[in-house]
Structures are given as structure tokens and as C-alpha cells.
Amino acid sequence: MSRLALFKEHVYLSRFGFTLFVILIGAATATPLNLPGPSTLMVMILVGWGFHMTYYGFNDAADYELDKLLGKKDDHPLVRGDISRRTALTITIAHTIGLFIIEFLSGTNFQLILLLTIACGAVVIYDVFGKRNPFPPLTDAIEGIGFLALALYGAAKAGTPTVLSYIIAINFALFTNFITGYFLGIVDLKGDFASGARTTPIWFGMRPAEGSGLPYIPRTLTILGSVQLFAILFVNFLPLLRNDFHYPPMIRIILVMIVAALSVGLCVHVMRFIVSDPRWQKLPEDLDNDRIAVYSISLVIVSYLPFLSTGWLLLLAICVFAPLAAGKILGRL
């Protein structure tokens, strides 16, 4: 049973789909009409798995004491003591080394190794120092750079990065910066504040409000979250505004309208969590993180829908939804 729990909780299987999506949509910008060969796709998937394990493995090890103190992840084998911290780190480091070995054996170059080094190094820095850094916005930005490098790795592995490759990479950098540095800091506020953790919301002055289940969110933090959110939406709109896809006018207008509607939905969903107003403010939960991810991925997919081949669209759908479905099934066992 403990091994199954390790698989379910330590790997965060349902979130592996997001890592794959970052790599593969990056690759799709380089070769939108043709899938890379099966061996190249397999390498990208395995590298994505190694990166995913690196990201969450170091995060679990770094936050072990905090999770134990706050009672978070009580069913996690590391927190329960079913496996030692050293064992968890060994598994994590093995995956990190493994992804570089796989990349070397697949036939690589300096650019690809550099991008993977930046990607892994950035998320490890975030995991280890993210809640211990006197200036947490810096580690948040470093984490974003890691996902930017990961998306560019996908593009460079499949072909030659294009303008779209850099736009989508910036998109993921902004998104991860907002989600983990800002939004999840609000979700975990009470525990982080009680334990003395340093997060961007706390650094900006966010505090649990006395006599209320809703936190106090200072205006500066609301402005920061709003700027981050609108930056994400702008980068989503940018390829359509520039018409980097070379769509016919009618298709372009239809896609802009759909993306605009999704953007409004995302703003309505998010703003109630980042503005202090007891009349409509709500306390976010972990599930809201997944909902925001669905909005963000939907924005990207809508923009790229007529641009990518059917093969790419099917592959992206499988790689996103298969880990999600597997995670839900295992979660019921």
C-alpha cells in the first residue's frame, strides 16, 4: 500500500500532463504540420517525466518539515515516515541524472543541454529557496525561467524555434510565476504565515484577517496579481494580433472572440481571489489551481487549433488527459 501511495502522491501523476504539454506545445511551434519521429517523441516524454520528478521531488524534500508541521499531505509516504527523506532525494536525483543521460544518448547538442540545465536548475532553486528567500519574487521569477527553458527545449528538440516558440515559452513562464508564486501563496497563506515561510503574498503584506475566514489582501498585491493576469492574457492574444498563424480573416476573428470569452471567464474566476472585498471575495482552494490551468491550456489550444496538424492535436490531448485520468483512477484506490 505504501508503494501505491508513493506513486499516487510523490509523482503527482495528474499534473504530469502539464509538464508534457509545455514540452510538446513548444515542439509543435517548430514543426506544426508534422510530428517528430517516434524516438524523438519518446525522448521528450521521458525527459518530461524526469523534469517532473525533479520538480516535485525536490519540492517534497525541501518542504518536508513544513508539511509535517502543518499536517499537509498526511497521506504522503514521506510525511508518514514510510520512506526516508534520503530515499526520496535519491529517487529524485536519479530521475534528474536520468533525464540528462537519456538526452545524451538520443543525440543532442549544447543548446539542448543548456536549456535542460536551466530548466532543472531553476526549479531546484525555487524548490529549495522558494520559501526561505528574503525576496521571494526573485525565486518565483527563477521558476518561471525554468518553464520558459523547458518549452524552448521542446521547440529545439523538434526543429528550429520560431517566434511562436518564444511567445509560448514566455506564456508558460508568466503562468507558472502567477500560479506557484502568487496564487498558491494565497491558498497556503495560513500555514505559510504560521510557520514563518516567506512567500510573495506574505512579502507584500498579506495576512490572515482576524475573525474572518478570508485573508486581508493589500492593494499592492492585488495590483501585482492583476498585472500578472493581464500579462498572461496579452501573451495569449499576441500571436493572433500579429497573425503569426497566417489565418484567414474570418477564422482569425472567430478565434479572437473565443479567446476573449475565455479570457473574461478567467478574469472573473481569478479576481474574486485577489481582491479584498467581503461582499464577493472567496478563499481559493487547490482545485481552483486546476481550474485556472484548464482555462490557460484552453486559451492556448483555441489559438493553435487550426494551426496544428490533427496528429499534434490528438497527441496533445492524449498527453494532457491520460495522466489526469490515471491520477483520478489511482486516487480512488
Image (spheres, grey):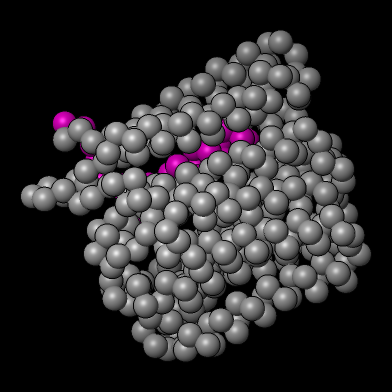
Q: Residue furthest top?
A: 249
The stretch in magenta equals: 279-301
Q: Quadrant of residue 91?
A: bottom right
Of the 4 image quadrants, the one containing the N terminus is bottom left
Q: How many marks?
A: 0
> In the image shown, does 191 or 125 lie closer to the viewer?
125
Vertically, is 18 above or below 301? Answer: below
Residue 280 in the magenta stretch? The answer is yes
Q: Quadrant of residue 108?
A: bottom right
Residue 159 percent coordinates (x, y): 87, 46
Identify which residue is drawn at 65% across, 64% down: 121
Tell me the chief SS of the magenta region.
Answer: helix
Residue 190 percent coordinates (x, y): 25, 58
Is residue 321 visible in the rendered image? The answer is: no
> Relative to 22, is 220 on the left or the right?
left
Vertically, is 113 above or below 208? Answer: below
Identify which residue is drawn at 82% across, 66% down: 103
Identify which residue is drawn at 68% across, 11% down: 250
